[in-house]
Structures are given as C-alpha cells and as structure tokens.
Image (cartoon, rainbow, N blue to C red):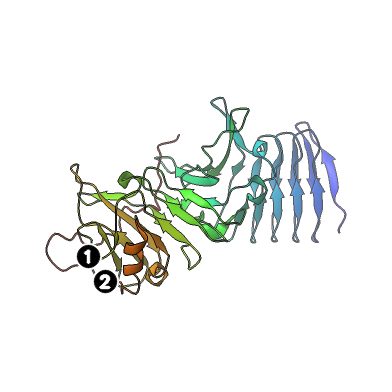
Amino acid sequence: MSLAKSRSTDASTTLNGTNGPDTLNGTAIGEIIHGAGGDDRLYGNSGNDRLYGDSGSDVISGDLGRDTLTGGAGSDTFFFSQIHDSYEGGGTGFSDMILDFSSDDRIDVSALGFIGLGNGHDHTLRVEANDDGTRTYLKSYAYDEGGDRFQLAFQGDVSQYLTPDRIIGKEGEDVINSGPGGNALSGGGGADTFVYDKITDSYQRDGLSQSDLIQDFSDDDRIDLSALGFTGLGNGHDHTLRVEVDDAGARTYLKSYDSDESGIRFQVSFKGDVSHYFEGDGIVFGNAAATESSNNLAPLAPEPSGDAVPIELLGIAEDHSSGVA
C-alpha cells in the first residue's frame, strides 16, 4: 500500500493518495479525499465528505454523513454498509450524491439485504428520475423502525445505467411482489418467484403500457399468476395467456387479449427471449392441470388481425420518471 499525504484547509482536511493502490480513511469531520492513481479504497467515516476516486477502479464508501462521491476514470464501485450511509427520514433527505455514475460503475448494497431492482418494496430498490432529468434516485420505500429508508441520489438522469448487472445485491431465493405497474424487476441470483395478485400490477390499456419489465428471468425462476384466474397458455382469450417474442428477440411478452370492464388487460414483459423458460413449472396458474397442459407450447408471433394489439416497445417499464424534485 502506498503512503498518502494529508493537508489542512480552512474548511476541512484534504487527504491525497498516490499513483499506487491506497486505502484512505476519513475521520469524524468532513474531509476531501482524493485517491489519485491506482485502484484505491476510500472511506469517509463520519462527516459530510467529498470523495474522489480519480483514475483507477476504486471502491468508494462515504459511510455516515451526507457525502458527495465521484468515481473518476475507471470502473468504480460505490459501497453502502448500512441504511444511514445514505437515507431519507422524517421528510428530510440525507442522501449521498454520486456525480459521475456511468455504465462502467456499480452500486454495492449487498450488506443492506436488497436483492435487486423493483418497486422499492420486498427488499428491492426503485429507480426514479425527476421530470427535468437533473436528478436520479435509487430508493427503498420500506422504512426501518426509526422511520428511515435507504435513498441514494445521482447527478443527472443516469437511469439507463442503473441496470440489474450494475446493482450488487444479496443473492437468494426471493419472492418479489410486483405492486401497481409498471416496474423494472430483478431477482438476482437464486430461484426467484415474481408474484402478481391483481391485473393492475402489470397491464396495457388503449395503447398505454404499464407493463412490468422483468430483467433477468431464468430457468430457475417462476412467475406466479395463480391469483388472476388464468388457466394456462393459449391464444390470450378465454382465461389463457399468449406468449409473444418480438422479431429482434429483445422482448418477450406474456399477455391476455381479454380486457376487463375498464379496458385493462394483463401484460408483463421480459428482457430478451425467455419463452423457453415458460415450459415446465415456469408459470404458476390457478390449477395444476392447466399448467401441465400448457407445457411445450411454442411462442407465437403477434396476431396479424382481429382484436390483437400490436407489440409496442415504447412506454415499457424502463422509464420510471416520478416527478421527484
């Protein structure tokens, strides 16, 4: 490990790394920490710190306090070990701010028990961007006993970079309840079950999609629709669901073509062509006989005529603009 040098300023202490790999630790006061060159580990400790990874692939942890974090060049990991590293509570924000998150960087929340992206409940984190694109938030809507919840802020609209592979969560066999659509959901590692209790959890109406997007569905996962009254796979009518894959293989859709009295029909979308995972017990319907009879049905192309609604790739669940200022 290289030796680092510190100097005092009127506002705070500045701690500078070297061109090699450094481990730099702050104190209880607010500090400015520069990693300089090398793959560094920066820890702010308490206080409102400013941490700069500079060049190299760094691990950056602001710890307690309202910190400003900048990774700089390289593939950086921003690590959070407790809720109060970055949180909202009592209507007041104590969120850390990441200034330069990019497609090469990652967020590590594995120590907090979060499993991936979702609607902010059931151990998931929700991605939201404000209307003018100046802030993005990664947040939980589950409060702890003290009334606080995890929330992390980013400068600008970086929602396109906050994908499942950029979030390091706790792996395991998880049950993820969607909640009102449309959400971007990720189970992470393990055999996960995505549960839908209501049609309004994920739907389409009059060309407007409020479909969830499940981003990492695999052969170990299941989608539980037993509460919705569907009996198996088919043409999307008479209590069946139709499987469709777009021409590019970028999206798979599981959808009904029968609308309720308000014009809503169930639809959930998946990243990539995952149609082969729906065989066997990939889908939990209302009764075992219906599920068994649905095995080995090939995915269908969109219906060319009749009451089918063409697949639309606009308005699906990647965009979670919330109007949060």
Where does residue 49 sit, x and y in percent of width and height? Answer: 71, 38
Instruction: Name the residue at 78% across, 31% down.
Output: 10
Query: Can you tell which mark lies on residue 113?
Result: none
The residue under label 2 is: 300
- Up the image or down, 18 lies above or below 26; here it is below
| Residue 94 seen | no
* Callout 1–callout 2 Cβ contact below 8 Å: yes
Where does residue 211 sit, x and y in percent of width and height? Answer: 33, 52
In space, the residues marked 1 and 2 are separated at their CA atoms by 9 Å
Where does residue 85 sit, x and y in percent of width and height? Answer: 67, 39
| Residue 109 seen | yes
The residue under label 1 is: 235
Instruction: Name the residue at 51% across, 65% down.
Output: 220
- Outermost residue, left side: 306
Where does residue 90 sit, x and y in percent of width and height? Answer: 56, 25
Local SS, label 2: loop
Left or right: 320 in relation to 167: left
Instruction: Name the residue at 37% across, 48% down.
Output: 182
- Examine the image and state in which quarter residue 37 appears: bottom right
Q: Of marks 1 and 2, which one's residue comes earlier in the chain?
A: 1
Under mark 1, the amino acid is: Asn
